[in-house]
Image (spheres, rainbow, N blue to C red):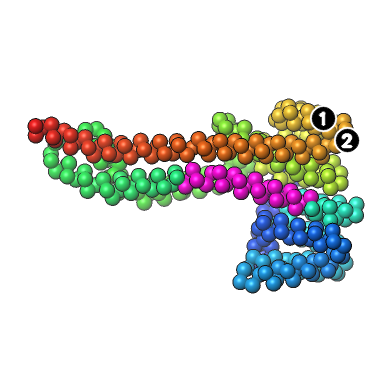
Amino acid sequence: MATTLTQVKQAQQRPSSASDPALSVSTKDLCLLTRQLATLLHAGMPLVPALSALAEQFESTGAGRGRHQCLAGLVTQIRDKVNAGASLSSALADYPEVFGTFFVPMVAAGEVGGTLEDVLSRLADTLERRARLRAQVAASLAYPILMAVVAVAVVVFLVTYVVPGLTQIFQEMNRSLPWPTRGLIWLSHVLRQHGPVLAIAACGTILGLCLAARSERGRATSDRIRASLPWVGPLLLKVEVARMARTLGTLLGAGVPLLRALNITGRVLRSARMERAWIQVTDSVRTGDTLAHALRRTEVFPPLVCHLVATGEGAGTVEDGLTQIAEMYEQDVQATVKAVASLVEPLVLLAMGLVVGFIVMAILLPIFDLNQAVN
């Protein structure tokens, strides 16, 4: 099973041809396509005319906007395949880099059960929730990150261009300088003489770590490091649990069989630790174990998740329990990120104030010493 999941993920990462219009399809575009197609089908329009209407709509709104033109081309290709006799799910399967790992099986289940429009609506809801959560997390972290970048840029500017002109005056006095001033002069000299080399080395180190993290061993190591960090480890676990619950609940709600839904869910997990745990869950369920007991045996998933899944299994509403889990953890992730962002902002301001204060102190101390010597 581990080999299968790895092979599937590697297949999904294969580059597409340059002529493939799907390369320009974003999550927002996919949400738009899915929602509008579900609306047209709910209105009673047959599938091929609905796809034609979507292609015409995207083409009319794509004048001057390449992404809508690419989306129109994609829908046109899918329509032509469906018009030639292919099912919608098989036509979508030709674009795995767009429709992901669970989109096609859900559409296939909707086609078999005769509930395609309902499945598409459920898919649109899931994609919109993912995009909304990602946007909210990014918005919460954008301001602290921007503040940190500006603070670093201001300090580098002061040390590199402002401080040298002032410290040169102190050095010409031929007096013993306080240690903060000597440290500031040394830092200014290092940045002026070796700044480009240090910047290239930092960028190279970051790039090397990113490349190393893509390997199986590097990914496992980075997962262990992140899991051991305070706040970061629990937050990433909540994100993975929310992703698992949302995906599995959506698949089961669409009528996808449990074992197939478990296999598909394992492909969307991003943590190596969670992937290993999910392989155990899938194998246990395949041998006849209940989902709740299989989750508990891994000792990875929180007890609350296991209890909610067990309750759902007892009532025959596992997908509802998984949806509740996803909503609970998504809200928890949003609240945690907002709390961390609100804490980081004053810390960045404090750190910047301390650094600027040190620079000011290093400049003023020789002046005070000179005044005392004159008096």
Name the disc covering residue 197, or none.
none
- Circle 1 crowding by C-alpha within 10 Å: few under 14, some 14–19, many from 20: many
Find residue 58 and report its image quarter: bottom right
Of 372 and 230, which appears nearest the observer?
Answer: 372
* 14 lies left or right of 294: left
> Which of marks 1 and 2 precedes in the sequence?
1
Residue extending furthest toward the front:
43
In the foreground, 23 or 10? 23
Give the residue displayed 17% in from the left and 41% down from the top. 170
Q: Could you say which is closer to the camera, residue 143 or residue 5?
A: 143
Q: What stretch is highlighted in magenta?
A: 122-146
Q: Name the residue under label 1.
A: 310
* In this picture, residue 368 sits left or right of residue 13: left
**Gap between marks 2 and 1, in whole Å?**
10 Å
Q: Is 129 covered by the magenta stretch?
A: yes
Q: Which mark is residue 316?
A: 2
Q: Is residue 346 above or below residue 65?
A: above
Q: Which residue lies at the image location 30% right of the left edge and 41% below the top edge? A: 187
Q: Is residue 53 above or below residue 326?
A: below
Type of the residue with mark 2: Gly
Residue 127, percent across and down? Answer: 71, 51
Return the x and y of residue 255 as percentages of the image width and height: 86, 46
What secondary structure characterizes most of the magenta part? Answer: helix
Give percent across and percent down for residue 188: 29, 44
What amino acid is labelled 1 in the image?
Ala
Residue at 70 percent of width and 71 percent of height:
59
Q: In which quarter of the image is the C terminus?
A: top left
